[in-house]
Every structure is written in structure tokens, then in C-alpha cells.
Image (cartoon, rainbow, N blue to C red):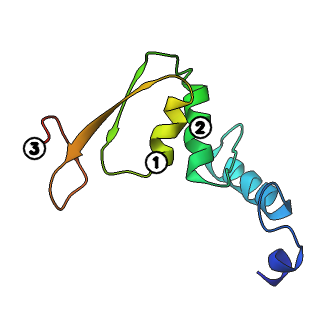
Amino acid sequence: MQSAMGSGKLCGDGGFTRRCQQWLEQRFGSAKVLLTPSCTASLEMAALLLDIQPGDEVIMPSYTFVSTANAFVLRGAKNRFCGCSPGHHEHRRNAD
């Protein structure tokens, strides 16, 4: 921890990030692992990898952070919000 904090590089593609990516690749036998700095960056990457196009529909919970929707709106998708059961987070087809 002291080495990471003392490096002066507290985010992004530093040495500890690369070491963690390599460990995950070896541990899970993956060809490539890419860590992202945020969930927003991950969702934007997912939209690109899924080749989301203008007019595509993306279903997401109505109770979410704005960047969840923005990642797909930026690609031209139509977001469809669904409700969640009270006290839970599973999606409901017919939100009340």
C-alpha cells in the first residue's frame, strides 16, 4: 500500500494495475484482462464492444446512476427503464 501510494500515480495504468491484470490473466486463463478506472468506463466499453447502434434498445432498472443510461445514450440507444420490486432489485415487467 505504501509503495502504491508513494508512487504518485493513484489511478489509471500504473505498475500495480498491470501486475493485477497479469495475475488475473494467469489465474483465469484469459487472453487479456483490462481493468477500468470506473463503472462508467466499463459500461461505455461494453456499449462499444456490443456494437450498440442508434435505435437499439437497452433495458435497465429505473433505480440506477445516470452514467448507466449515458453509456448507451451516447451510442444512440433507446433506454427502456423497468421497475424493481419493493425492497429488492430484481426487474419487474410491469412496474407499478
Of badges 3 and 2, the one in the foreground is 3
Residue drawn at (30%, 37%) of the image: 81
Q: Secondary structure at mark 2?
A: helix
Is residue 34 or residue 37 the one in the foreground? 37
> Badge 1 local density, few (<14 within 10 Å), some, or many (20+)?
few
Q: Is residue 18 left or right of residue 87?
A: right
Q: Which mark is residue 66?
A: 1
Q: Position of residue 75 (x, y in %)?
A: 56, 25
Identity of the amino acid at label 2? Glu
Q: Is residue 53 above or below residue 79?
A: above
Mark 2 and mark 1: Cα distance apart in space: 13 Å
Kind of residue indicated by mark 1 = Val
Query: Would you name the residue on which mark 2 appears?
Result: 44
Residue drawn at the location 65% of the way across and 53% of the way down: 27
Residue, far bottom: 2
Image quarter hosting the C terminus: top left
Image disc number at residue 47:
none
Give 12 or 24, whichever is nearer the viewer. Answer: 12
Q: Residue at x 71, y 39 (%)?
A: 32
Return the residue at label 3: 96
* Count of labels in the image: 3
Q: Callout 3, which amino acid?
A: Asp
Give the number of the mark in front: 2 or 1. Answer: 1
* For marks 2 and 1 on the same chain, the one whose residue lies earlier in the sequence: 2
For image coordinates 71% across by 37% down, the residue present is 31
Marks 3 and 2, the one that precedes in the sequence: 2
Task: Name the one closer to the observer, 63 or 30.
Answer: 63
Expressed as whole percent of the image width and height from the top left, the position of residue 34 reads 70, 45
